[in-house]
Image (cartoon, rainbow, N blue to C red):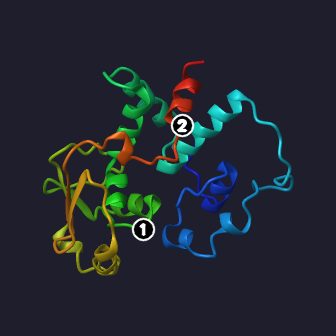
Amino acid sequence: MARYTGSVCRICRREGAKLFLKGSRCYTKKCSFERRPSPPGQHGVRRRKVGEYGLQLREKQKVRKTYGVLERQFRNYFNAAENRPGVTGENLLRTLELRLDNVVYRAGFAPSRPAARQLVGHGHFAVNGVPTDISSFQVRPGDKIEVRESRKAREPFKVVKETLRNHQAPEWLSVDAGTLSGSVVTPPSRDQMPLDLNEQLVVEYYSR
């Protein structure tokens, strides 16, 4: 399966929830989900009764598309979460939250996860002083994420310096707007991760 390159607004409409894939546009009246909340397609307005399997599948797809992960990679994340001590669903979400692209987004260095993935892929960030362009890189507590010195003068980060003043980073992240850097203080707890995702349905889906 190749990475999805179509309209991301269709993804939100298909999952029936705002996934905030377009950054600031999602907070305006231009948001496609606000204007047309029905599923995409010619017969999108029709509402069918969804069974237990359908609910589990849609929630799995919702989580996967929220973080921009492909199916095989998502399954690998689940298998790893299942084999670790603790609650499987929380382990899965914690792994996704600690991806480098998500940490960049959570810290306020990018307006959306897709934008964060692009910035990371272009080599704008360093982890513990080492340039890193792998979006799926797993950040650990104590790691420092920063915009590379040679990239700070570029236009996207001039905008970031302004927006960071009003950005509220989660408690598990420490952000320094002056140096465009941040660090992971502690692994995120469940109440510090997206509350609109039902990870238990994902666990049930893979436990069939």
Amino acid type at image mark 1: Pro
Tell me the residue at 39%/61% (across/down).
Answer: 116
Depth check, front residue: 11 or 52:
52
Quadrant position of the N terminus in the picture: top right
Is residue 121 visible in the rendered image? The answer is no
- The residue tagged 2 is 71
Q: Position of residue 67 (x, y in %)?
A: 47, 49
Q: Using a 10 Å C-alpha cutoff, classify the residue at mark 1 as few (fewer than 14 neighbours), some (14 to 19) or many (20 or more).
A: many
Examine the image and state in which quarter residue 182 appears. Answer: bottom left
Q: Is residue 154 left or right of residue 79?
A: left
Q: Using a 10 Å C-alpha cutoff, classify the residue at mark 2 as few (fewer than 14 neighbours), some (14 to 19) or many (20 or more).
A: some
Q: Position of residue 47 (x, y in %)?
A: 83, 46
Is residue 130 visible in the rendered image? The answer is yes
Q: Position of residue 20 (x, y in %)?
A: 52, 61
Quadrant position of the C terminus in the picture: top right
Is the residue 146 above or below the residue 72 in the image? below
Chain-order first, disc 1 or disc 2: 2
Spatial CA distance of label 1 from label 2 is 24 Å
Taking the view exactly as shown, the residue that stands out farthest to the front is 191
Q: What label sits on residue 30 in the rendered view?
A: none
Q: Is residue 171 left or right of residue 79?
A: left
Q: Secondary structure at mark 1?
A: loop
Examine the image and state in which quarter residue 104 appears. Answer: bottom left
- The residue tagged 1 is 111
Tell me the residue at 27%/54% (across/down).
Answer: 171
Amino acid type at image mark 2: Glu
Tell me the residue at 27%/78% (across/down).
Answer: 161
Depth check, front residue: 159 or 6:
159
